[in-house]
Amino acid sequence: MGYLCPDYCVTQRLSDKTDVYSFGVVLLELITGKTPILREGNVASAALTSWVRAQLKEVLDTDNYINIVDVKLKNNYKKIEMIRMIHCAAACVYKPVKYRPKMSQIVEVLQGKLASESIWLSSDNTFLKDNY
């Protein structure tokens, strides 16, 4: 639970794009230090993707991502690499299937060989609406 692409629930078909979604969830775990299903006690309270979505538009507009980054990192990371990870996670998880990047593009962005804007533009923030 938590890694499964919502599109798979509808179509019951796996594709490279469903794998891209799952990789985006892994990136969100690395960024936030949280599990894919958030819990309060022994009860599942929300999905990580929903929790991040609520804050992501501001994060992407301002590059102020302190509220979503794992506090255990204690600012011990490179800002540009964190921004790349956030853009990649957003593109993997929040873009509709037909607009999701290829894994090769994600790898190139993470390596710094391709600009983050090649997979996530500020206009893509419209994908962050709650009814995805």
Image: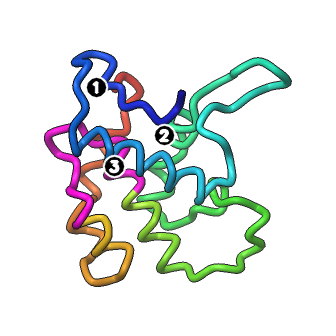
Per the image, the residue denoted by label 2 is 53
- Residue stretch rendered in magenta on the structure: 89-104
What's the distance in space between the residues labelled 2 and 3, CA to CA?
12 Å
Q: Is residue 57 left or right of residue 47?
A: left
Residue behind mark 3: 92
Rendered image: mark on residue 7: 1
Image coordinates of residue 65 in percent, x first then y, are 58, 62
**Count of labels in the image:** 3
For residue 47, above or below residue 43: below
Measured Cα–Cα span from mark 1 to mark 2: 17 Å
What residue lies at 59% left-to-right and 38% top-to-bottom? 36
Q: Who comes first in sequence, dot 3 or dot 1? A: 1
Viewer-nearest residue: 117 or 41 = 41
Crowding at dot 1, Cα within 10 Å, few <14 / some 14-19 / many 20+, comes out as some
Q: Residue furthest left?
A: 98
* Labels 3 and 1 touching (C-beta < 8 A): no
Image location (x, y in percent) of residue 52: 54, 43
